[in-house]
Amino acid sequence: MMRIPPYYRRPSWQRFFSGMAIGGAISWCIFVYINGVWQERNTKLIRMQQQDISDLKDSIKIWQEEYKAANKRNLEKITVQNINVKISNWEKYKLDEFSVFQTEESVKDDIQMMLAKDLETVAKSKDLLKKIIENKPVKINEKRYKLKVKEMVIYTTLTIQVDIQFDE
């Protein structure tokens, strides 16, 4: 049979074991305290960050709603502010640039009433604009020409590209 050696009777060993037990208990208390302080600090930080995230999400939602409303209001207010007319095939008929410029300005004058109109109105009257441009004969260098609308872009600048051809 085995026996445990009788160390419990010697005072030096008793002090060593009691010191280990007390040191272990003190270090465990210190560990629990430090761990508790860190957990409390991290929990507080996480709660603050969650509150910040919640506030920022609410703020983003408010800003997005305001942005959408402002865009909607601005889209309703967008108007035609400029008109550009470009004759694309004038070289084919050997026309001089001044005559082409005068013709472009004449077309601009004919559709000048579209300035300061909102985009929806201009878009609805697109066919009317096309007929105004195409039904007016143009006289350049004693020859009669007619214009054909090739492309029309309606935005704050009304851009119209036309082709010129002989009038039959």
Image: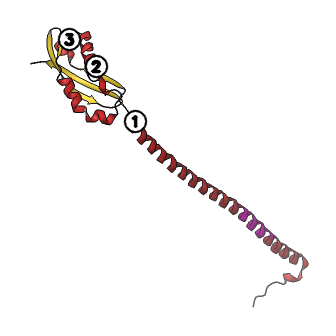
- Quadrant location, the C terminus: top left
Q: Which amino acid does label 3 sit on?
A: Leu
Q: In this view, does 44 lie to the left or right of 68?
A: right
* Residue at 26% from the left image edge and 36% from the top image edge: 124
Q: In this view, does 37 lie to the left or right of 132?
A: right
Q: Which residue is identified by label 3?
A: 95
Q: Is mark 3 on a helix, strand or loop?
A: loop
The crowding category of the residue bearing disc 1, from other C-alpha atoms within 10 Å (few below 14, some 14 to 19, many at least 20), is few
* Position of 167 relative to 156 (above/below): above
Write the start and end of the magenta stretch as one range: 26-38
Q: Which amino acid does label 2 sit on?
A: Asp
* Residue at 36% from the left image edge and 28% from the top image edge: 116
Query: What x and y, as percent, mark residue 6?
Result: 84, 84
The span from disc 2 to disc 1 (Cα, nearest Å) is: 24 Å
Q: Which residue is identified by label 1?
A: 77
Foreground: 124 or 47? 124
* Mark nearer the viewer, 3 or 1: 1
